[in-house]
Amino acid sequence: MSQNPDIARWTSAEEGPLFERKSAFDRSSARARQRKAADIARDIAETLSAMANADGGELPIGMENNGALTGVPHAEDKIRLLLGAPKDRNYVSPPLPCVARELSDRSGKRLLHFQVDWSPSVHLLTDSRCPLRVGDSDQPFDKDKIKALKEAKHQGLFERTFPPGAGIEDLDDALLAAFTATVAAATPRREALRCLHLVEARNGHVVPTLAALLLFGSDPARWHDRCGIDFVRWEGSERKSGAELNITKRFRVEAPLAVLLERAFEAIRPFIRERQQLHDLFFIEKLEYPTFAWQEAIVNAVAHRDYSIRGLGIEVWMFDDRMEIRSPGMPPSPVTLDALAQHQHMHCSRNPLIVRVLTAMGYMRELGEGVPRMFDEMERAGCYPPRFEAVGGAVVQVTLRNEPIYDRATLEWLSKFKTVELSGDQKRMLAHAHAHGDRFTSRDCQNLLGTDIYAASTAIKDMIRKGVACSPEKRSRIYLVQEPFAAHAEMPAGFVNLLPALQRNGGLRNEDVRKILALNRIAATRYLGDLTNSGWLLKPDKRGLGALYAPGPRLLHQSRTSANSGETDAIGAETDAMKP
């Protein structure tokens, strides 16, 4: 008997905003034990509430985090309790709009599957917590913002309207076939659309929502006047009009949203210039904007725009020094322009149906992660961070500047730290220190970043923990830049393979050693013991599987010596008021 295609998909699916697996067993001790049904029911209510408060999702019970199918061995009365948990006010209020079912794999193991839709209501747990799905976790939501979240959710009702006169025949069969073949191969086309709440049966007919018509419609412009993307290339750095009109290229990309993004990328890509730079006697090409940054800005404009505003469309304006992407509608609460500017991991969909399809198609991977990654990509390219601002109170504008913050030599030097997870501010500190003899003080950090001594202290301590800075002498107020740990001939076998993880996390855990060197737990423990005994690592204060082994004096000495070439003797006194 062949495996159920849904079960096969859940086994390999990556956990994220729209998908979660949960086990029916407690594996906190050496011997696995059957979990209490009431505890599983609470987990079901929490995860499904978080998903319903975000963009919906699905939850199979009876699978481990790695996808292994272990089943739900509970008695029938407990199974009924679990299946009814989403609608039980003892766990969640109001009841969740959920579909629950029971199924078995070919070996007879029982699974429970829950699918919840985005909900216009805000769902609370019995302890008054309001969870929200962020990435692959359920996060508590600020109660003071629940009212704003409710109001934002009602904006999502617009994509669920049913335009008069629209029928299933108004959808493009070829687009639907390509979509279902990619994301729901074993599911009939109409059933897949129904599960995604893109169509609904009414009076014996299947009718599409506005979201379905925009995503897969044969003629989406029939249902929305401005659902495409307008591109304008301006000459120079200012917008002029009249006799001085400086438009050099203008076009509109119109297509169903399912293919609009790719067509827009293809049309705009030729206008992203390449610049030649001399590197090691060879000319290399570098794009003026990181590909992910400008494409993510357009994806967000399409996915999160306010489609109830019919008189405005998405616009991409390109100048000599910058690129502006404009999208109708202000961000839905609790997302704010300030939160976006601080690249916080926040997400609230105005159009959850459209977002789910674009996520399934691979345009949006980690909900709430796109904007922080835009900042990372711009910083990695040495460019200024993206700027988010309101235009006329009804349009969000994202501005990407192509002017570099650092010169080529500094960028090349900063690339040595690419294996280390550093913030943009920490990279700026390193660049500043590199221009001043590879050293800096707390006062330098405060002045450069415009922060107080406590925030500077936190940033410096984190840089020390990650091994990119060090204090050469006890009570010294000067900090030296330390390049990432490099391999040395006398290092123990396999240790060089651990250096990236050590640098990235500020230390090593038993789990890191097991994964990277393919050792079992006992062998990894012995290996870490050898490294601490020989001075390459420091013993952690707390023992256990999660203990972090920090860089040891032998490793720090070698890195410091190679980075500073013996210059530490020249360090003088510093008059800072306080050392972090």
Image (cartoon, rainbow, N blue to C red):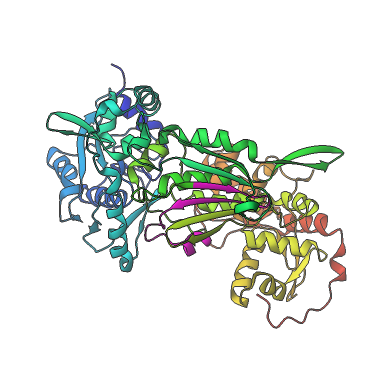
Split into 4 quadrants, where in the image is the C terminus? bottom right
Between 186 and 256, the one nearer to me in the picture? 256
Measuring 28% from the left and 62% from the top, which residue is drawn there?
Answer: 129
Give the side of residue 67 with respect to residue 238, left or right: left
Where is residue 88 shown, x and y percent of the image? 15, 51
Measuring 30% from the left and 53% from the top, which residue is drawn there?
Answer: 155
Between 398 and 79, the one nearer to me in the picture? 398
Where is residue 437 shown, x and y percent of the image? 83, 65
Measuring 77% from the left and 52% from the top, which residue is drawn there?
Answer: 413
Regarding residue 298, the answer to whether it shows in the image is yes
Say if the magenta span includes residue 280. no
Depicted 241 relative to depicted 71: above or below: below
Between 287 and 109, the one nearer to me in the picture? 287
Where is residue 388 shown, x and y percent of the image? 52, 59
* Span shown in magenta: 315-342
Q: Quadrant of residue 346?
A: bottom left
